Amino acid sequence: MSASDDLARLHSIEVSLEARWPETRIAPSLERISALVDALGSPQLAYPTIHVGGTNGKTTTSRMIDALMGATGLRTGRFTSPHLESFLERIAINNQPIDGKDFIFAYNDVALYLDFIDKKFEHPISFFEAMTALAFVSFAEYPVDIGIIEVGMGGEWDATNVVEAAVSVITPIGFDHMAYLGNTLVEIARTKGGIIKEGSMVVLARQELEVATELLRRAAEVGAEVAREGVEYSLLSRSVAVGGQLLTIKGLGDTYEDIFLPLHGNHQGANAATALAAVESFFGGQPLDPEAVHAGFAAVTSPGRCEIVLRDPTVILDAAHNPHGAKALAQTLESEFTFDTLIGIFGAFADKDVVGILTELEKVLDTIIVTQSVSTRAMSVSELEAIAKKIFGNDRVVAIDDLEAAINQGITDARASIADESVGVVITGSVVTVGQARAILKRLANKSE
């Protein structure tokens, strides 16, 4: 099969998968995914797993665990969501998106089972359930030594919760997806804590008191051993460095100094400590090879998370899609960058807490351009403009319907500044906005070469 044939086949598969229930439409149940993986021979049990849940930092923490595991010499499989530019990004083998041919091979194995299970239940297999099964099969067929599996939404009834994880990780929990997860932090924590398995190890990032209480209750209920940030492990120190930060982390088995992490923000330092504790837990709490720790963290990337994608002017992408994420972004921009002026470009989904997000961003953005992505879930520009003007005031808000036009305007405005002024552009909001912007900026960069 030629490369063009592969691309055509991948496009056909993507269309077929996207015709299924979208991942935002949930019928909370493990019945469908359980039946599907049973029919496939339970591929998710063919290798040990680390299961990563929480509200913010799941994807980056998963990528850090992946990098550390790879540095120890293990073959890794990583499943994350959502994707930025290509749906193949969701399934990574040895820290790289799955090869198109391998994905086609896995899909050909799974496709008939999808149709078979569809007929057995009132609701069909969703896009996310299908992608989860495809990841499990891909990892088993490679085969991998360790699977790093990120929860999609919630935990208890998330499609990924058919794994029997040796280690569960729960990153900071905040308000998001309340229509499905509950309107209080305790309710949300109860659902997310559903990934903690009997007799397993659970690594808990720093949490609000009521969240920590609920997660510890769940751990005690199932007899899981707990490692808590600030107690059993901690980020001892961090300092800003060129291109990232230097960390000292007290792990479960040792203290690791002078770790270079090529990511910005205190929250990323905390994510690194949690990732390290998760890997130590997987190896029974034993110290890790310091060289592997340094090499693993130095190799970490996290696209779309405070990612600098352009210089002159500096353009930063960050998928801050809830108030907790927006607060972390604002703190990072304020503490680790020295811009005189910051221009924001913002597009969000209609079902998100846009007021909460913009309230956090208003603290650091001088002006904001509101726009929208191609997603059908995107809030209209007119709605965004009305909300933004209430928070920023009329003079600091510009509305541009087309995302590419908004990006061009932001870059033009930044370049028009006086010579001795440092102006940055921050593109944020939904993951789709950031992913679409990433592709646009790549195209603009190629044109200028």
Image (cartoon, rainbow, N blue to C red):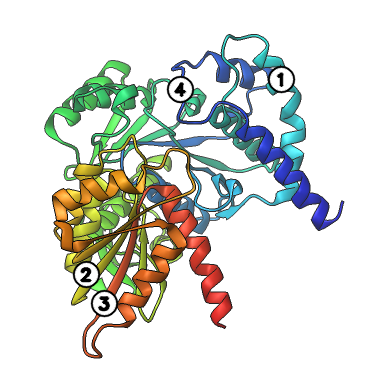
- SS label for mark 2: helix
The Cα–Cα distance between marks 3 and 1, rounded to whole angstroms, is 53 Å
x%, y% of residue 114?
68, 22
Above or below residue 184? Residue 365 is: below
Question: Given contact means CB atoms under 8 Å apart, are the residues at marks 3 and 4 in contact?
Answer: no
Where does label 4 land, which residue? 26
Above or below residue 205? Residue 306 is: below
Say whether residue 234 is visible. Answer: no
Of the image marks 2 and 1, the number of the one nearer the N terminus: 1
Identify the mark at residue 423; answer none if there is no mark.
3
Where does label 1 land, which residue? 115
Of the image marks 4 and 2, the number of the one nearer the N terminus: 4
Residue 312 shown left or right of residue 91 in the figure: left
The Cα–Cα distance between marks 3 and 4, rounded to whole angstroms, is 42 Å
The Cα–Cα distance between marks 2 and 3, rounded to whole angstroms, is 14 Å
- SS label for mark 1: helix
Q: Residue at x 27, y 69 (%)?
A: 246
Q: Residues within 10 Å of mark 2 (few under 14, many from 20)?
A: some
Of the image marks 3 and 1, the number of the one nearer the N terminus: 1
Q: Relative to the observer, which residue lies in front, 82 or 440? A: 440
Identify the mark at residue 410; answer none if there is no mark.
none
Where does label 2 land, which residue? 336
The residue under label 2 is which amino acid type?
Answer: Glu
Of the image marks 1 and 4, the number of the one nearer the N terminus: 4
